[in-house]
Amino acid sequence: MKKRYCIVTAVFLTALIILSGCSSSKEEVLTLDKLRILSEKKDNLSWNDFDGYPFEDIGFGLYIRKYNVADKYQLLISGNNLEEKPIGIYLAKTSDERIDIRYEDIDRFILASETSFDN
């Protein structure tokens, strides 16, 4: 009986270890490349396009989600509610340096911000 119990326990633990490695709870990292692809949707971008990426809720009275992008940038998405399209989707280096990725060129912004910090 003990041998059977040990075998069942070993099989259960093995299955548990294998299944934990297959977990889909790992969040993807939002990269500049992924952001470039998403920005092609322009005005069709929605909150759902950013599902699965880790964010910090920083809004008070307004939905504002902050996503870390690469090491130097943040994506700030704001809106009145999650059922409507966001009001703003900004890639930011600092609070003064930001663009709306739906209407402005991400690569031009990155190049300009990299150049300004080299001086």
Image: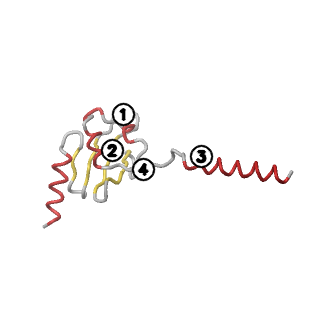
The spot of residue 33 in percent (x, y) is: 28, 46
Q: Residue at x 19, y 53 (%)?
A: 110
Specify the amino acid type for callout 4: Pro
Secondary structure state at the residue bearing disc 3: helix
Which of the marked residues, 1 or 3, is nearer the chain's N terminus? 3
Q: Nearer the viewer, residue 89 or 115?
A: 115
Secondary structure state at the residue bearing disc 1: loop
Which of the marked residues, 2 or 1, is nearer the chain's N terminus? 2
Specify the amino acid type for callout 1: Glu
Q: Is residue 46 above or below residue 96?
A: above
Q: Dot 2 corresponds to which residue?
A: 78
The spot of residue 66 in percent (x, y) is: 36, 51
Binning the other alpha carbons within 10 Å of mark 1 as few (below 14), some (14 to 19) or many (20 upward) gives few
Which of the marked residues, 3 or 4, is nearer the chain's N terminus? 3
The spot of residue 45 in percent (x, y) is: 31, 36
Binning the other alpha carbons within 10 Å of mark 4 as few (below 14), some (14 to 19) or many (20 upward) gives some
Disc assigned to residue 30? none
Q: Dot 3 corresponds to which residue?
A: 19
Q: Is residue 37 above or below residue 108?
A: above
Q: Is residue 41 left or right of residue 28?
A: left
Secondary structure state at the residue bearing disc 2: strand
Q: Nearer the viewer, residue 80 or 40?
A: 40
From mark 1 to mark 3, how far is it between C-alphas?
37 Å
Specify the amino acid type for callout 2: Ser
Q: Dot 4 corresponds to which residue?
A: 54
Disc assigned to residue 84? 1
Q: Is residue 6 above or below residue 103?
A: below
Binning the other alpha carbons within 10 Å of mark 3 as few (below 14), some (14 to 19) or many (20 upward) gives few
Q: Residue at x 34, y 36 (%)?
A: 46
- The residue most toward the right is 1
Which of the marked residues, 3 or 2, is nearer the chain's N terminus? 3
